[in-house]
C-alpha cells in the first residue's frame, strides 16, 4: 500500500511552499501590522522573474537566485515608494489593507500586461519520476523539497541566531520595548521586507515548478491557503507560520486518503483544510504556537 | 469598536457607490425600421479560456462588419454597432461585471458571450434576464442553460448542449472500447465539467457500461497529485476527462507521474481540440489522446470561412470555434431586422424564425440576400459558419455536427465527422 506515503510526500511538498510564503506574511504582519493582500502577487512576480532567466537559457539554479533577489528588491522598493509614505501618513489598518488589495491588482495586471494570459512552464521534465521506495517523486518535487529544506534552515538560523533576526522577533513581540532597547526601527522594517520578499520569490518559483504550468493568477489563487497557514500557526509568529503551512498541506492531501471512508472527494480538499482550521481555532484560538491571551 | 464601525462605514459607502453606478439608463427601443443595434461581447481574454476568447471576439467583429456591409448593399437603414468587448477572465464574477458595464454604460441590447458555462449562467441570471437583454452564448454547453428559470426566451446558444455532447461522446467511446467497458471519469469542478460528466455517466450506464472512479477536481488548487492518483486508480478500460488546456497542463503531468494512466485510452472534449495547447502540454500527457468536439459541418463553407477569417485578421489564431460567435451576431441581427426593432423583447420572438429549418436557405456568404428576406418578414433558414442552428423553444440547437479527433506525434487530426440529433 503506497498510497499513504505518497500522500504524505505530496502534502509535504505543497505544505513547504505554503510554509515559506506564510513566514513572509506572518513577519510582515507581526512587525508592520500590515495584512499584505499583495503577497500572492509577489509570488507570481518571483515565478515570472525565474521564468525570464530560464528563457535566456540559464539554469534553474540561476533562475532561483534571480527570482529570490528580484522579489526581495521588489518588496524593498515598494516599502520605499509605497508602504513607507503610507505609514508616515498614519494610515490605519483598514486603509493599508485596501491599499494592499489595490497593489495586488496593479501587480497582477502589470504581470498580465507583460507576459500575457497564457500559461507557462519551466524547462523541467514534468513527466519522469524517481522512485524512492514506495513513493514516486517528480524532478520538480525533488527540487522543491531540497530548496525548501535549505530555505527553512536559513530562516531558522536567521531568526534564532542573528542579531537582526532577534531584533525582528523582539520588535514583533513588543515594539515599544524593542525601540527603548535600542532596536533601529527603519532597519528592521527594510530587513523584514527583504526577507519576506526573498521568501515570496522562492515560494513563487517552487509553486510554479510543482504545479507544472502557471499563469499570472497563480499567486492570487494561493493567497487564501497562505493566510490560513498564518492563522493556523498563530498570527505574527514566524515559526508558527512554517508549522501551519506544513499542517495545511498535509491535511489537504491526506483528506483524499481512501482509508478514510473511501476518501473525501478531491474537490473538497480545501473544505477539509478550512474545517480543520475552524476546529483548531475553536479549540486553540491563539493558533498552534500562540500563548493563551491573558484575561484583562 | 471604532475599527468595526469604520469597516462598516467603508463597506456602506462602497455599496452606495455601486448602487448609484448601476442606476443608469435602460436599453432604448425603436419602433420603426431605422435603428441601431448595439452588440457587446463578453469573452475570456484572460483565464482558462484565454486561448479562444480573442479569436471569437475577432470573428464576432468580422460578423458585425459583414452584416453592416450587407445592410448597406440592401439599402436597409439599420446599423449594427459594437458596444464593446469586455474580458470575463473566465470567471463568473468578472463576467457579470463586464456584462453590467456593456449593458448599463454602453447600452448593449445584445450580448454575445460567454464561452465558459459558469460565466454564461451568471451573466444570464444577474445581467441579461433582469435587464431584458438578449444573450447569445457561442460555446456554453451546460444543460442548466436549457432549464434556466425565468429566462423568458432571452438566452440562446450556438454550441450544442452537453446533453447532446455527453451522448455523442458515449457513442464514440462505446464504438472504441465496447459498450460494457469500465470508464473512470474526471472533470473540472465547474458548470461545464460537472454537467458533462453527469450526462456522460447517465448515457454510459444506460447503455450497459460501468463507471469506475469519478473525480471532480478544483481548477485553482496548488497540487493535482492526489486527484490524479485517484483518477488513475482502479485499472479501468478507459478514461473520460472534461477539462480545459490550462488546467490539464497541470493535471496531465500529474496523471503521467502516477504511472497508471494512458492518454491513448483517454477521451476528452472540444476545448482540448487545439494542437498548440496539446503540444505545449507535452507528448507524454497527450500522445494518442482522442476526443469529440462540436464542429461546423465539414465542407467548402467551413473552408471558406476559415480563409475569410484569416484574410480579415492576419496573424490571428484560428481555433475552429470562430463560427459560433460569428453566427451569434448574424442570427441576432437577422432577428432584429425581421422584427424591425432593436428591442430585445421583439428580437427574441424572431430568433427561431431565422435559424431554420423551415424557410429559405441562405449561407453565411449570402448575407445581403438573407437580410433582404428578413426585412420582407420572411422565415429564413440561416446556414451559418457553424452550420444550421435550428433553435428549439429553449434556445438550444436541435442538431450538431461532431468530429472525433486524435492527437498523435504532435499533430491533431480529425478521424471522422458525424452528425448527431435532428433539426426540428
Image (cartoon, rainbow, N blue to C red):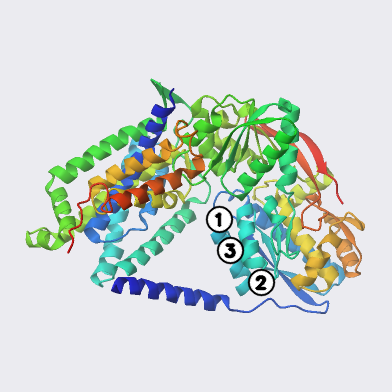
Taking the spot 71% from the left edge, 78% from the top edge, the residue there is B28
The residue that disc 2 covers is: B131
Chain under disc 2: B
Q: Nearer the viewer, mark 2 or mark 1?
A: 2
In the rendered structure, the answer to whether residue A1 lies left or right of residue B352 reads left
Q: CA distance from mark 3 to mark 2?
A: 12 Å
Where does residue B63 sit, x and y in percent of width and height?
A: 75, 60
- Which numbered tag is attached to residue B91? 1
Residue A138 seen in this snapshot: no
Name which of mark 2 and mark 1 comes first in the sequence: 1
The residue that disc 3 covers is: B96
Name which of mark 3 and mark 2 comes first in the sequence: 3
Q: In this rendering, is residue B263 above or below A184?
A: above
In terms of depth relative to the viewer, which is nearer, A49 or B329? B329
| Callouts 1 and 3 in the same chain | yes
Q: SS class of the residue under badge 3?
A: helix
In the rendered structure, the answer to whether residue A254 lies left or right of residue B216 reads left
Q: How many marks?
A: 3
Residue A5 seen in this snapshot: yes
Q: CA distance from mark 2 to mark 1?
A: 21 Å
Taking the spot 52% from the left edge, 51% from the top edge, the residue there is A117
Amino acid at each position: 500500500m503506497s498510497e499513504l506515503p505518497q500522500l504524505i510526500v505530496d502534502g509535504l511538498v505543497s505544505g513547504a511552499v505554503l510554509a515559506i510564503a506564510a513566514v513572509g506574511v506572518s513577519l510582515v504582519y507581526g512587525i508592520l501590522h500590515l495584512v499584505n493582500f499583495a503577497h500572492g502577487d509577489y509570488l507570481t512576480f518571483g515565478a515570472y522573474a525565474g521564468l525570464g532567466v530560464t528563457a535566456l537559457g540559464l539554469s534553474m539554479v540561476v533562475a532561483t537566485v534571480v527570482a529570490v533577489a528580484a522579489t526581495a528588491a521588489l518588496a524593498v522598493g515598494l516599502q520605499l515608494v509605497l508602504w513607507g509614505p503610507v505609514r508616515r501618513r498614519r494610515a490605519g489598518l483598514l486603509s493599508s489593507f485596501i491599499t494592499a488589495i489595490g497593489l495586488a491588482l496593479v501587480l497582477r495586471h502589470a504581470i498580465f500586461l507583460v507576459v500575457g494570459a497564457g500559461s507557462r512552464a519551466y524547462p523541467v521534465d514534468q513527466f519522469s519520476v524517481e522512485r524512492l521506495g514506495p513513493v514516486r517523486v517528480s524532478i520538480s518535487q525533488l527540487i522543491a523539497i531540497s530548496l525548501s529544506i535549505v530555505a527553512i534552515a536559513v530562516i531558522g538560523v536567521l531568526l534564532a541566531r542573528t542579531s537582526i533576526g532577534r531584533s525582528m522577533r523582539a520588535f514583533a513581540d513588543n515594539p515599544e520595548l524593542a525601540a527603548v532597547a535600542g532596536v533601529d526601527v527603519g532597519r528592521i522594517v527594510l530587513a523584514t521586507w527583504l526577507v519576506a520578499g526573498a521568501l515570496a520569490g522562492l515560494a513563487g518559483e517552487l509553486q510554479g515548478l510543482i504545479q507544472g504550468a502557471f499563469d499570472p493568477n497563480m499567486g492570487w489563487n494561493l493567497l487564501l491557503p497562505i493566510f490560513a497557514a498564518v492563522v493556523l500557526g498563530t498570527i505574527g509568529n514566524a515559526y508558527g507560520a512554517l508549522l501551519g503551512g506544513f499542517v495545511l498541506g498535509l491535511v489537504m492531501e491526506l483528506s483524499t486518503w481512501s482509508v478514510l471512508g473511501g476518501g473525501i472527494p478531491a474537490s473538497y480538499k480545501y473544505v477539509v483544510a478550512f474545517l480543520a482550521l475552524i476546529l483548531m481555532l475553536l479549540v486553540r484560538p491563539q493558533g498552534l504556537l500562540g500563548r493563551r491571551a491573558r484575561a484583562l | 469598536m471604532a475599527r468595526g464601525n469604520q469597516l462598516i462605514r467603508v463597506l456602506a459607502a462602497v455599496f452606495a457607490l455601486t448602487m448609484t453606478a448601476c442606476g443608469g439608463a435602460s436599453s432604448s427601443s425603436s419602433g420603426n425600421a431605422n435603428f441601431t443595434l448595439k452588440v457587446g461581447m463578453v469573452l475570456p481574454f484572460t483565464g482558462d479560456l484565454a486561448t479562444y476568447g480573442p479569436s471569437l471576439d475577432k470573428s464576432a467583429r468580422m460578423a458585425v462588419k459583414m452584416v453592416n456591409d450587407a445592410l448597406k448593399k440592401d439599402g436597409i437603414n439599420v446599423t449594427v454597432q459594437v458596444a464593446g468587448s469586455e474580458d470575463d477572465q473566465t470567471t463568473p464574477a468578472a463576467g457579470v461585471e463586464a456584462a453590467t458595464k456593456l449593458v448599463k454604460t454602453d447600452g448593449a441590447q445584445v450580448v454575445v458571450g460567454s464561452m465558459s458555462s459558469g460565466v454564461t449562467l451568471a451573466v444570464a441570471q444577474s445581467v441579461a434576464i433582469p435587464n431584458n437583454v438578449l444573450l447569445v452564448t457561442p460555446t456554453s454547453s451546460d444543460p442548466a442553460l436549457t432549464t434556466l428559470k425565468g429566462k423568458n426566451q432571452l438566452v440562446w446558444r450556438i454550441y450544442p448542449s452537453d446533453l447532446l455532447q455527453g451522448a455523442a461522446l458515449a457513442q464514440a467511446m462505446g464504438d472504441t472500447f465496447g459498450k460494457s467497458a469500465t470508464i473512470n471519469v474526471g472533470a473540472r469542478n465547474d458548470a461545464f465539467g460537472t454537467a458533462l460528466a453527469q450526462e456522460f455517466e447517465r448515457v454510459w450506464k444506460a447503455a450497459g457500461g460501468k463507471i469506475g472512479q469519478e473525480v471532480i477536481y478544483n481548477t485553482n488548487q496548488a497540487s493535482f497529485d492526489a486527484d490524479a492518483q485517484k483518477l488513475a486508480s482502479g485499472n479501468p478500460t478507459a478514461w473520460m476527462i472534461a477539462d480545459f488546456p490550462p488546467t490539464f497542463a497541470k493535471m496531465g503531468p500529474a496523471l503521467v507521474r502516477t504511472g497508471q494512466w494512458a492518454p491513448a485510452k483517454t477521451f476528452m472534449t472540444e476545448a482540448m481540440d487545439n494542437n498548440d495547447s496539446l503540444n505545449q502540454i507535452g507528448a507524454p500527457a497527450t500522445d494518442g489522446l482522442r476526443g469529440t468536439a462540436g464542429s461546423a459541418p465539414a465542407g467548402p463553407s467551413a473552408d471558406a470561412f476559415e480563409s475569410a477569417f484569416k484574410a480579415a485578421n492576419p496573424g490571428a489564431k484560428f481555433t475552429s470555434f470562430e463560427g459560433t460567435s460569428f453566427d451569434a451576431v448574424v442570427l441576432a441581427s437577422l432577428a432584429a431586422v425581421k422584427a424591425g426593432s432593436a428591442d430585445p423583447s421583439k428580437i427574441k420572438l424572431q430568433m427561431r424564425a431565422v435559424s431554420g429549418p423551415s424557410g429559405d436557405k441562405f449561407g453565411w456568404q449570402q448575407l445581403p440576400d438573407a437580410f433582404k428576406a428578413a426585412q420582407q418578414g420572411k422565415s429564413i433558414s440561416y446556414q451559418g459558419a457553424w452550420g444550421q442552428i435550428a433553435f428549439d423553444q429553449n434556445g438550444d440547437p436541435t442538431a450538431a455536427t461532431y468530429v472525433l479527433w486524435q492527437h498523435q506525434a504532435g499533430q491533431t487530426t480529425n478521424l471522422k465527422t458525424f452528425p448527431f440529433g435532428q433539426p426540428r
